[in-house]
Amino acid sequence: MNYYENILQTIGNTPLVKLNKTVAEVPALVLGKIETFNPGHSIKDRMALKMLEDAEKEGKIKPGGTIIECTSGNTGMGLAIAACVKGYRCIFTTSDKQSKEKFDMLKAHGAEVIVCPTNVEPDDPRSYYSVAEKLSKEIPNSFWCNQYDNLSNRQAHYESTGPEIWEQTDGKITHMIVGVGTGGTISGTAKYLKEKNPNIKIWGVDTYGSVFKKYHETGVFDEKEIYPYITEGIGEDILPKNVDFSLIDHFEKVTDKDGAVMARRLAREDGILLGYSAGSAVAGLVQLKDKLTKDDVVVVIFHDHGSRYVGKVFNDDWMRERGFLDEELKVRDLISMKPNKEFISVQKTDTVRDTFNLMKKLDISQMPVMNNGDIVGSVTENSVLSYLLENPMDNTEKNVESIMGKPFPLVDEALDFRQLSKYLSKEVPAVVAKDRTGRMHVLTKYDVIQAV
Ligand SMILES: Cc1ncc(COP(=O)(O)O)c(C=O)c1O
């Protein structure tokens, strides 16, 4: 029989997988260290267990005690799993910008979660750091892990992540790139790798709204760099003790949008469902592609699983609301956004009067004109109006065929919606698109403006 004594023994030894389509522009061999294979689906299982076991060894927590931590979810998950196996209570403080899925998963392992406001100073009594500190003072036999400053965090990566990467690449790694939050992953792994080969370049990925890059480059902790951002897990408004800036060769900032878009590409193109910071790491690497050659071997560390972001990065409405989806918006998306999907048209033998009445009744300004199921022309408010003005005495029993204009252009539902500007003009107020079932839809300038 071949089995583990408990789930904690399955932590680590995660696979290294070549990235293909998402890094097609990068000349080097790019390998993803897929930490979602850990039992808590993130790299943080490694350091959570290490922080707890070091605390046990040092007598900082005794059986039956309470683990306290401020966590965006992943460290909490690792701690919660370890607490189940080892028999501890867990209380986590977290910020209200984190995905709800993350809190619910912590609760699934029996943890208690306190949600604190994001947009307060770290020393504000409501911040998730302050609440965790206060609880640790109030609750007897409790241990506040403090992943930011507890150096067991980076030691976990020095002992496991670093050696794994070194062995898996057969010592051929030339660059490592990874998102930086507490700094544990980058600093511990970098220390091991640089001890093996000091020429290995270590690149940290930072967010706009975080202090890391400027501090690394100038030594100045600039509060003006701090503002709220959407990316989860990376960037900070403090300098955690776990970040060893001397081991990091370069920080690359990635926008919220680029990280999210790349996380979606990793899922769709390379088939790997990963979290937000994984998208940021690959986006950062693509930004740095000109610094690489075909002989380089780059390892990107992927922190967590995409299942934690199904309501966010992997939700089209969430992406659209933040303006992250414009590159991907297609004609078919415009169709799906239309509240009324009925295809309203007139026959070429219908009278101008009936056409006018229909337009008035349905409050529409343009319509295709049909004959035997084919689009043969179009009528617009303007064409009806000009006819009525030019022929005021007409009894309007004429066929609409006599006043119709050219048919609206037919476009493919897969067309990028921005391409519609090539079709729409003063004279052409709408296009017609067929969906995959063959149903036709009129898309007007108004529909496009709504989508924008
Ligand atoms: C999703 C995610 N990415 C990246 C990081 C950054 O890792 P580290 O704290 O080791 O710097 C974290 C840490 O919380 C994380 O949860």
Image (spheres, grey):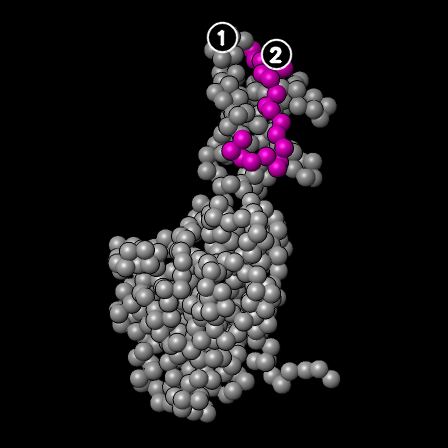
Look at 47% across and 54% down and name the residue there: 280
Q: Position of residue 150 (x, y in %)?
A: 38, 77
Circle 1 residue: 390
User: Is 326 in front, or is 31?
Assistant: 31
Instruction: Examine the residues drawn in magenta and state their main secondary structure.
Output: loop
Q: Amino acid at mark 2?
A: Ser
User: Is 370 in front, or is 322?
Assistant: 322
Say the numbered circle drawn on residue 25.
Answer: none
Circle 2 residue: 402
Q: Position of residue 261 (x, y in %)?
A: 51, 49
Q: Residues within 10 Å of mark 1 (few under 14, many from 20)?
A: few
Residue 433, by quadrant, is top right
In the rendered image, residue 418 lying in the magenta stretch gets the answer yes
Q: Position of residue 186 (x, y in %)?
A: 44, 65
Boundaries of the magenta span = 395-419
Sequence-first tag of 2 and 1? 1
The reply to whether residue 224 is in sight is yes
Look at 63% across and 15% down and name the residue there: 401
